[in-house]
Image (cartoon, grey):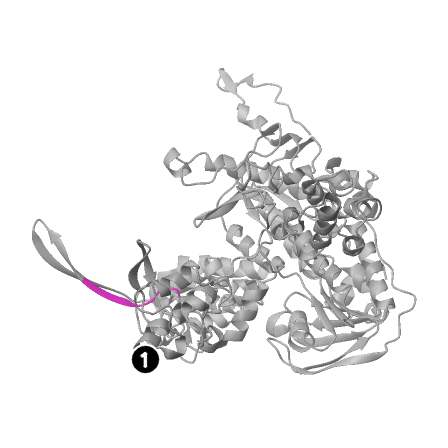
Amino acid sequence: MNRDVKELVTTSHDEGVPAVLCAADSHDLIRVHGARENNLRNVHVEIPKRRLTVFTGVSGSGKSSLVFDTIAAESQRLINETYSAFVQGFMPTPARPEVDVLDGLTTAILVDQQPMGSSLRSTVGTATDAGTLLRILFSRLAKPHIGSQKAFAFNVASADASGVLVVNGKKIEKGFSVVGGMCLRCEGMGTVSDIDPAQLLDDSRSLADGAVTVPGWKPDGWVVRSFTESGFLDPHKAIRDYTEQERHDFLHRDPVKVKVKGVNTTYEGLLARVRRSFLSKDKETLQPHIRAFVERAVAFSVCPECHGTRLSETARSAKIDGLSIADACAMQIGDLAAWARGLTDPSVTTLLTVLGQTLDSFVQIGLGYLSLDRSSSTLSGGEAQRVKMVRHLGSALTDVTYVFDEPTVGLHPHDIQRMNDLLLRLRDKGNTVLVVEHKPETIVIADHVVDLGPHAGTKGGEVVFEGTVEGLRASGTVTGRHLDDRASLKPSVRERSGVLEVRGANAHNLRDVDVDIPLGVLTVLTGVAGSGKSSLIHGSVAGRDGVVTVDQSPVKGSRRSNPATYTGMLEPIRKTFAKVNGVKPALFSPNSEGACPTCKGAGVIYTDLAIMAGVATTCEECEGRRFQASVLRYRLGGRDISEVFAMPVAEAAEFFRNGEARTPAAYAVLDRLAEVGLGYLGLGQPLTTLSGGERQRLKLAGHMAGTGSVYILDEPTSGLHLADVEQLLALLDRLVDSGRTVVVVEHHQAVMAHADWIIDLGPGAGHDGGRIVFEGTPADLVSARSTLTAQHLAQYVGA
C-alpha cells in the first residue's frame, strides 16, 4: 500500500542540473493510527487518495465512527482553525477525535442521509442551484419583464421604503423598492392556515389562571407574561369579559415594543405568535404532543391566491414561450431539462449550459421524477442524500474527500449502476471518495476496501480486512463470505387468507390503480424509485383499521431521546434501581432530578450556529455520563446507571434477565430490539444519530407488542449488512406465521425472492410510472422477465 519515494533528487539529462521530484508526491495516503472513537479499538488504516474506498462490515461494527466521527470530523475541525481568532470566538470548539495520528487529510465534504431541514420554505429548487439558475433565466427572457431574479423568488417579498439621508449637513431624500415574487396571502408557503382561537384558550379563565392552553405556555412562563405585563390586558380578568378592543389586542395586535420586568421585548397578538412559533416548520417534524395540538387547532388549505405555487400574480405573469416559472418548477425535472435544451437565445447560452448540466445531474442520479417545487422535508433519506450530491457533481474542486453514507439507499437495482457511475466520476476528477455501504453492487467497484468487525458494538471496532475486492472474497470475514450470496426462489409460497382491496388509487402519479393486496402472506411492493410505491401505500392503505405503518421517518422526540426513553424501558429500570437502593426513581433519569446540572443530563454541550452545523462537545462536569456524581454511587448488579446507558442492547438483555438486576419489563423490550437486529445499539445513544433503517427497526420493535394485523415496512434492509438480511427474513417469516400480514416496500433482491407475492409498479418513474406492471409470485415474475425488476431478479437468482 505505502508507496515510498525512493529518490527525491535526480539528475536531468536535458538540463544537466539537479531536478527535484517533489516531496508532495509522497502524500498520497490518509493515515489513521490509534483511532479509539466510540467502539474503535486502536484502529490503524491507510487509505489511498484519489481512489474509491468502500467501508463495510456488520451494522454497529464502527464504520461511521472511523469515517464520519474520526476522519471527516478532524478535517472539519482543522478547517475551522484556519479562521481568524475573532471568527473562532463565535464558533464552537469541537474536541479532537480520539486518535493518535491523522495524516494526509484533505477538505471533507459530507453527503449524508440527514433530513435537509424542516422549513416549509425549503424546496428542491432552493436546496440546489437549479432554482437560482431558473430565476435568472426568467429575469432575462420572460415577457413582460418584471425585474431582477428576486422578482421570481417566493422567499422575497415586495417592499417600498423611503427616507432622508444627511450628507455634510444636507438632507437628501432617498427611496427604494424591492420587487419580490412572494405571494403575500400565504407569505410564500403555498398553504394558508386558519387557527381556531377556541383551541388556544379557555375563555372562562383569566391569563393569570391559565387561560392560554397552548402546550408549554405556562401562566408564569415568558410568553404568557408578555401578555399579562404588557399593560394592554388585565391579567385577572376572564377572557370572555374582555372588551372588543381588549380582545383585538389579545388575539390580533400587530407587533409593538414593550417592557417586561425592565426587559425590552416585542408584544404581538396570540394568533400571530402561535403562527410564528408552530407553523413555520413542517408539522411532521414536530414532537407528537405539539403535532397533535397543531392538527387540532389549525386547518391547512392550498392558498386561494397563488394556488399553491407560492408566487405572486406578477411573478406568474412573466412567461417564456407561454411557460411561467411556476409551471417550470412544477414540471418533472427530466421534462424541465428537455424544455431548457430547447431554448436557443444566444444572450443566455452560458446560463443554459450550466442549468442543463444541473438538471441532467438530477436525471443521471435517478431523481428525474422530482420537481423543483417539491418540499425538501418530504424527501426520503436516500433522496435527500442524492439531492445534496447534485451540488457537487458540477463542482470544479479537485483533491477533495467526499464522504457518503449508503448512497444506494432507496435505489432500485436498475438505478444502482447509475449511482456507481457518479461515484466513479467524482473519483476520476481527482477526488478521494469514501463510501459506507452494504450493497455488493457498490462494494465490487471499489479500488480499496476496509472491512470492520468482526461483530457489532463492543465486539467490533477492528479492521478485519484491508485491500482489494478479490482479497475480500478470499479473506474469510463475514462480509467476504456473504459478498457473493445469492438467494434462491422459495419452492412453495403461502396461500392468502383474503385480500385488502385498493380501488381507483390516484395519489400523486398513480393512474387509477386497482389492486388486491393478499392477506396472511409476505407481499413485496417494488419498482424503480418514483414509480408510485409510497403513494400507493400512504395514500390508499395506511390509516385503515389494523394497519401499522413502520417507515424510516425521523423518530419524534428531541436529541435527548434515546432507545431507553423511546421504548419505555427506562421506567422499569429506574424503579428497579430505586427499589434496590432505597431512593427515588427520579434520580435515575437524565431528564429529572439526577441529571448533571451543567449539561442537563444530555452528556454533551450543544452549540448551535445559524451559519454552520451545530457541534456537540462532551460535558466536562460529568464527563459524558449524564448524571450527578452522587447518583453514580448507587449500583444495581455492580453497575451504576451511566454504565447501563452505555450498554449495547444485547448485553443489557442478559444483564436484566436474571440476578439482582432482573427486570422482566425491560428484558421484554430488549429482547424485541435484539430480534429486529438492534442488539448492537446503545441504550443511551441519541435517536438523532440513528440511520433510517435503524429508526424503522426501532419502531417495529415497539409495534411488535401491539395488536396490528397488517404490517407495512418501508425498505427494512436499509443499513443492514448482507449477513443481517437473513435475520430480517426470519423475523418477517415469524410475523407472518403468527397470523399477521406483512407488506414490504423493498428493492433488495433477496427479499423479493423470499416473498409469497410481488406487486411491481412502473414501468418508469414520475409520469412514466404509476401503473401495476406485474402481480404474482416471484417465480412467475422471473419467468415473465417483462419488467426491469424481473430482469434484475432473474439475474440475481441465476435463472
Q: Residue at x 76, y 40 (%)?
A: 453
Quadrant where the C terminus lies? bottom right
Count neighbours of disc 1 (C-alpha within 10 A) and say few if under 14, some if 14 to 19, many if 20 or more. Answer: few
Could you say which is closer to the camera, residue 606 or residue 84?
606
Q: Residue at x 64, y 56 (%)?
A: 418
Quadrant where the N terminus lies? top right
| Relative to 308, 441 lies left or right | right
Dividing the picture into quadrants, the one containing residue 247 is bottom left
Q: Position of residue 618 (x, y in %)?
A: 57, 38
In the displayed structure, 180 sits above or below 106; it is: below
Amino acid type, label 1: Glu
Q: Position of residue 716 (x, y in %)?
A: 73, 60
| Relative to 192, 144 lies left or right | left
Q: Position of residue 210 (x, y in %)?
A: 46, 68
Magenta stretch, residue numbers: 155-162
Dividing the picture into quadrants, the one containing residue 296 is bottom right
Q: Does the stretch in magenta take in 58?
A: no
| Relative to 781, 78 lies left or right | left
Dividing the picture into quadrants, the one containing residue 384 is bottom right
| Relative to 525, 376 lies left or right | left
Secondary element type, mark 1 = helix
Could you say which is closer to the camera, residue 503 or residue 625?
625
Could you say which is closer to the camera, residue 628 or residue 137?
628
Q: Does the stretch in magenta take in 157?
A: yes
Residue 596 visible, this angle: yes
In the displayed structure, 596 sits above or below 491; it is: above
Disc 1 designates what residue?
244
